[in-house]
Image: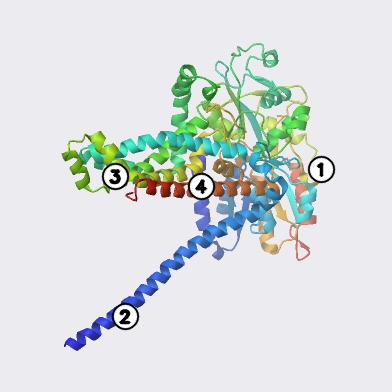
Amino acid sequence: MKRMLCVMSILSVSGLMSLTAWAEPTSLTGAGATFPYPIYSQWAYKYEKLTGVKLNYQSIGSGGGIAQIKAGTVDFGASDAPLDVKELEESGLIQFPMVIGGVVPVINVPGIDPGKLVLSGELLADIYLGKIKKWNDNAIVAMNADLKLPNKAITVVRRADGSGTTFLFTSYLGKVSKQWREKIGVGKAVAWPVGVGGKGNEGVASYVQKISGSIGYVEFAYALQNKMAHVQMKNKAGKIVAPGIRTFQAAAANAQWDKTPGYAVVLTDQPGEQSWPIAGASFILIHKKQLNGEKAGAMLKFFDWCYKHGSEMAEKLDFVAIPANVVAMVEKTWKTEVKANDNPVWP
Amino acid sequence: MHKLSTIKTTASSRDQTRADLLFRGFTALCAIGLILIVVGIFIELLMNSWPAIKKFGLSFLVSQKWNPVPGIEEFGALSSIFGTLATTAIAMLIATPMSLVIAIFLVELAPPRMAGIVGGAIELLAAVPSIIYGMWGLFVFAPFMQDHIQPFLGEVIGGPLFEGPPMGIGILTAGIILALMILPFITAVARDVFLMIPNVVKEASHGMGATTWEVTYKVVWPYCIHGIVGALFLGLGRAIGETMAITFVIGNDHSISASVFSAGTSIASTLANEFTEASEPIYLSALFELGLVLFGLTVVFQIVAQLWLRRLRKSTGGRA
């Protein structure tokens, strides 16, 4: 809740600033995903101090961000779920990953300490399908022989609003469970078979904290800040991993960025012994044809700065920077694709 | 001298008629503007929801399915309509008797100083933004419901109405929070209605030996029923469209259950939750159609209120 107020006050302040911004030399506007908002605003703050270039990012949600960049009312859009290549082509956009984060299942089960419970993707899918109804179900006990699981009903908690976090979560369940893939599907919002919905990460977090016997999923930073009991996951390689910067990085490193058009990589269920199974990149969307070359150059310079100098700040906020080899690929794409008056914007 | 004053009067009365005309024109313009806005909203809602209306037809109103996954979208408003009506009904059931009793106490029984303090508190409550009720509902009231009220209801009364694990949130909690939100509105208006009864009437009946109860029931009540119904519909109108507070505590699940412990969703909370990320055109259109349904519900309630008032006016012999 505190964060929501903070976001609202920043938005209103930045709204005021944008009114006066016409007099400033360079000011960039972006809109979209809420998930990377903390790190984007940190980067923008630092970058303005260094260079005087102002960035106004409105975290209105990926859907709104996509609509606004298509309408051309902002300089860049941001989305948690990658757009498919066809949609990019149609609207003349390119997309590239900016930052990586992870989604973690969190629980509130009496007698189970944080980080002790181990789940597999199949188990998680069965819980969210409503097939596993009790915490002492044989399938859960089999993976957690050393834990004393109570005979308590499982209350499933998920997002009520459409969100990139849900997209990553359902993408993972869809990859590991055939039934999920066929019955429910993957999306920013789905027709959940069971459970209650909280609005935003804070809504899910507070429901999980309030309802005894519940399980939910939130972005990693949120689980940490609220000191919630996360679970460990069995990944694709069959290894048990805990959520954290290292395991998110492993998931990103093992992805095949170069072979995916539009960098539309979804970092769920990635190979690799250390890979956390529910990670994902947040994407930036910009127009291929830029109207103002100078402004476009300033924008790409900002992104370049974030790639090269922003990783420490990202880690402090529990985000992971994009691997260097991927950055090189992205900047090559800038060079060949982004143009103003047919001249490349990025040198 | 006499002549001069006559001229003066005519001039000023001419001015007055002109001012009157201007004033009348201005007020009429504002009133017509209001109608235009309502019609405009209706047309806009209809236009935006047209793709959904065309695709789902009447099944939108009776289907319980709500599936926003791209490619297999299917939308039905029934669960949202059910949640809206269920929470509003619970809220009215609780708020109506309570607010009337409070208003009667304030007007008839309370010592003046106390009436002033309680009256001020009620007006203050009416001014609290709904998101505050939502936060209080989620962080304070829901745990209380979970630990005390829901287990009590489930064990003592039970049955299909009070079934399921006590989660603290759900239809019942949302209804109670709504009741608290509309209570000050109904109370404040009802109190003003009660205050409008001429004291002579009340004093006369007291003078004839009537008890406070008799005065309230036989004199005050028939006199005020008209205004009270108005107050109730004001509360109903607020309850039916309430958004943020409900979103926090209703559980946001597109399902219909007989138990008031279970999670549900209302039209307004569905809109608040899903609008931001609805990027598919048909999804957006379905949300607009939900808005249209809410608009329609409000109109229906208005018509019912008007009809009811007309009948009351007849039955009370035009006194109210």
Side of A249 where A196 appears, left or right = left
Determine the secondary structure under disc 1.
loop
Q: Amino acid at mark 1?
A: Asp
Residue A321: which quarter of the image? top right
Determine the secondary structure under disc 2.
helix
Of callouts 2 and 3, which one flags the residue occurring earlier in the amino acid sequence? 2
Q: Chain of mark 3?
A: B
| Closer to the eye: label 1 or 2 | 2
Residue B142 in view (yes/no): yes
Q: Amino acid at mark 2?
A: Arg
| Mark carried by residue A258 | 1
Spatial separation of the CA atoms under disc 1 and disc 2: 85 Å
Of callouts 1 and 4, which one flags the residue occurring earlier in the amino acid sequence? 4
> Circle 3 is placed at which residue position?
B194
| Nearer to me, B231 or B110 | B231
Determine the secondary structure under disc 4.
helix
| Closer to the eye: label 1 or 3 | 3
